[in-house]
Image: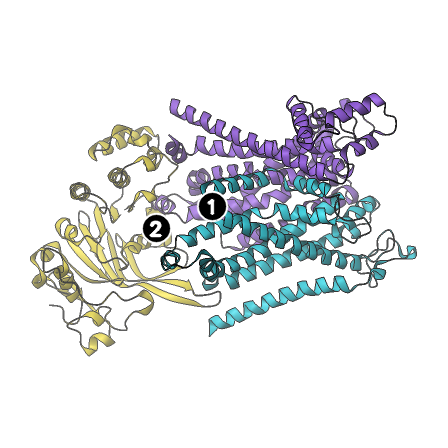
Chain colours: A yellow, B purple, C cyan
Amino acid sequence: MEQNKNTILEIHDLSISFRMYDSRFEQTELKVISDLYLSVSPGEIVAVAGASGSGKSLLASAVLGLLPANASLSGHIHYKGQELTPELQKNLRGGGIALVPQSVEFLDPLMKVRSQTGGRDKAKTAERTRVFKRLGLPDDTENLYPFELSGGMARRVLVSTAMLSSAELIIADEPTPGMSLEQSLQALTMFRELAREGRAIILITHDIDLAFEFADRVAVFYAGTTVETAPASDFKQGPRALRHPYSKALWEALPQNSFRPIPGSQPYPGDLPKGCLFAPRCPMRTAECMEHVPPVRQIRGGEVRCFYGS
Amino acid sequence: MRGRFFNLCSALIKNGMKILSLLLAVSIIAFVLVTLSPIDPVQQYILGLGTAISQEQREEIEEYWGVGEPPVECYINWLTNVLRGDLGVSSLYRRPVADIIGERFLSSLALMVSSWLLSGIIGFSIGCLMGMRHGRFLDRFLKKVCYILSSVPTFWLGLVLLLVFSVWLGWFPIGFSSPIGVLSGDVTFGQRLYHLVLPAFTLSLMSFPNIALHTRQKLVEVLESDYVLFARARGEGNWDILRRHGIRNILMPAVTLQFTSFAELFGGSVMAENVFSYPGLGSAVAAAGLNSDVPLLLGITLFSTLFVCVGNMVADLLYAAIDPRVREAVE
Amino acid sequence: MKRLNRRTRLLILTAVTAAALICMYVLGLAIPDEAVEGSFLEAGEPPSFEHIFGTDSLGRDLFTRTIKGLSLSITVGLVASAVSAVIAILVGLAAATGIKGIDGFINWLIDLTMGVPHTILIILISFALGRGFTGLLAGIAATHWCSLARLIRGEVLQLRSQQYVAISRKLGKSNRWILAHHLLPHLVPQLLVGLVLMFPHAILHEASISFLGFGLPPEQPAIGIILSESMRYLSAGMWWPAVLPGAALVLLVLLVDKLGDELKMILDPYSAQE
């Protein structure tokens, strides 16, 4: 497969299934992510947007090689043009790829912040002081236990771990919920700064507004697949600039637009439709949509997985 | 800092009050139970002392037990004596009960402490091993072993070990905490240790499955936690995870559990001491019950209650003193 | 269809375990006392085809004695667990009445019962009742109710806060009606499982205490007594009176444990669905 040397991460046809045990003797496969694609280049922020249950959070685990034992993965992930093998993933954890997790639950409750952000090493301490200052964290934050942090502080500490790393790819999983608008803007500004340093950033979020506002490109997830990736500017322009009926519907559903929800609901991973995953809810569907999975097509500088996308 | 000290003190006082109330209740219940017994304590006592008993001694005994007085007064009489440190005289050993308890407790303590540490260390290590390998063959195998061991009565395990190591292999003596025919003052530390090994090992085998299964469970929870996922994402390997996050999060619950297991430990030592004829409190309490030595029976009952309660209190305080979250919540 | 199969399989397994226990019990009762009487000609024989557990120093067949002992253990276990369960129900329900003083007192009572090592408490109770069989039963019953009582208390408190209970109350149903229609259906399975899980502990305690010499006269074939006697001949190399009856006891305990686990899987809808 042809690889773009400029991208940090490229994902093609990624599928993830879970083996679930109904009972001691039966097992079923739950396909949580199907035929997903995504790419991100240095200095770029790609927002991954989608409703909960669209498989966003699993993406980070898949890239880092931290899926639970009962998950199986197919497809291709390339890091800087190299096939991402378990050995490579092992080297990249704590190195080339950093994760910014969702909540304070991701910090060891019995370990002070210091030990979880580099420890007592002299160089690390200096670096931490600098980063904490930049994030507006009080000086004694490093002496606190995670339960002593406020929600906003905890999130900034989590962001600091990525800033303290030398990672070229940062995957941030829902970094903003629970923050005030001001704090969210602040956090996202930090991500922009990280991107300016030449790092690539994947911003997983269900806050579509913020995604439009801050990302360079937006990838829309639906039921575990990418239905469209497009420059963020297209989303600001509105449905006419968009390519996939789901992206359009998502835009319509925003409060500041017509606030009109799409009827129906996302399919359950154990019960996926045969053809296009969005077909059962799509106003434009045809018999073909119900039978075949549409290929990814390049349209006007974006990509869309739809027979009729324009 | 001052607040923390104050809190520890108030917890100490609260616990102390509870222990006192429990001890008082146990003293009442125990006294009522021995009074209810068809076996008349004073009669048995005098029988136990044998026929060579002077009228003077008899009166002394009857006064101690308050013979002829109503039960409540009997009890108060006895309690006052106990509070003054006079637990009465054992008819079996013909010595003051307080002395016997003091002496035998040291023997029992050596046995209990060694097996407590041994079972704690073995249990914790095996629990960690099982947790790290959870779901694999080794884990399932060790889990089976733990379940089977917890279905084995202590005394039978002791019998089998005695049979194998003392009778067949001849590695260890068959009984007594010191060689027969040697004065207790001349017994060396090495000899004591030699007689301690099998009973301590038996007792540890009985109590380690509990701590191992508990540790395993806690470690599995930790390994499946979000913070371990994040630690892995930052490049920590299995060993780092266990060292940095696992032990940190599971050691305290395990230590606390060990402290709350004093009742089982004491109960187990009663059985082990009887199998190995080890001269501790456990063999004394069985002998006291069988020979109707009421003062000794009551004395050991109170003492063992105190022992268990102190263990529970230490567990409580330890938890409050060490876990930063509890510490904070109390302040 | 498959779930049904699995459930059926579980039921069959449970039935087999229960049948094995019942067999042991009935066999023990059916063996006449005369069968246990031995002859000195056969004293101290190691296991053979004739006496698969060997004979003891009085020439009694150890296998028959063991079976009788196990049957006795089952009796003690059943009676003591049942009595313990009744205590647990009463205490647990009382604690869950919601009256603060009672709840506090019962917690204290549980601390009290857990505060004395059980072996000591059983010795004490046994002594109080004249060191006989009743004392043994009472002692075991008095020491095993705590965890089940706690479980019941928690369960009732949780049920009481359920909306359907609150609605029944609003509809004017009496406490007794609520107890019978809402609480008991939830509690009975829990109780049954708790009872079976208590059983092995009771059996182990029975063996321990009779090993120490309390409870049963020495000529009775209790496992504890057989093992206690065996100690005297251990140094002479007579291993079978110590090893085999004890192993049989362990087998019994494991069987009962297994029965408890199986019942739990059948009765507890949560774990049964997994």
- Whole-percent x, y for residue B112 in the image: 64, 34
The image quadrant of residue A302 is bottom left
Residue B153 visible from this viewpoint:
no
| Mark in the foreground, 1 or 2 | 1
* Mark 1 element type: helix
Residue with the mark numbered 1: B218
Chain where mark 2 sits: A
Disc 1 marks which amino acid?
Lys
Query: A96 or C61: nearer the eye?
Result: C61
Q: Mark 1, chain letter?
A: B
Residue that protrudes farthest toward the bottom in the picture: A287
Q: Nearer the viewer, residue C85 or B255?
A: C85
Residue B32 in sight from this viewpoint: yes
Residue C116 placement: quadrant: top right
Dot 2: what SS? helix
Please state which amino acid type lies under the numbered disc 2. Answer: Leu
Mark 1 neighbour class, 10 Å CA radius: few under 14, some 14 to 19, many 20 or more: many
In this figure, which residue is indicated by the disc labeled 2?
A88
Whole-percent x, y for residue B261 in the image = 57, 39
Q: Confirm whether circles 1 and 2 share one chain.
A: no
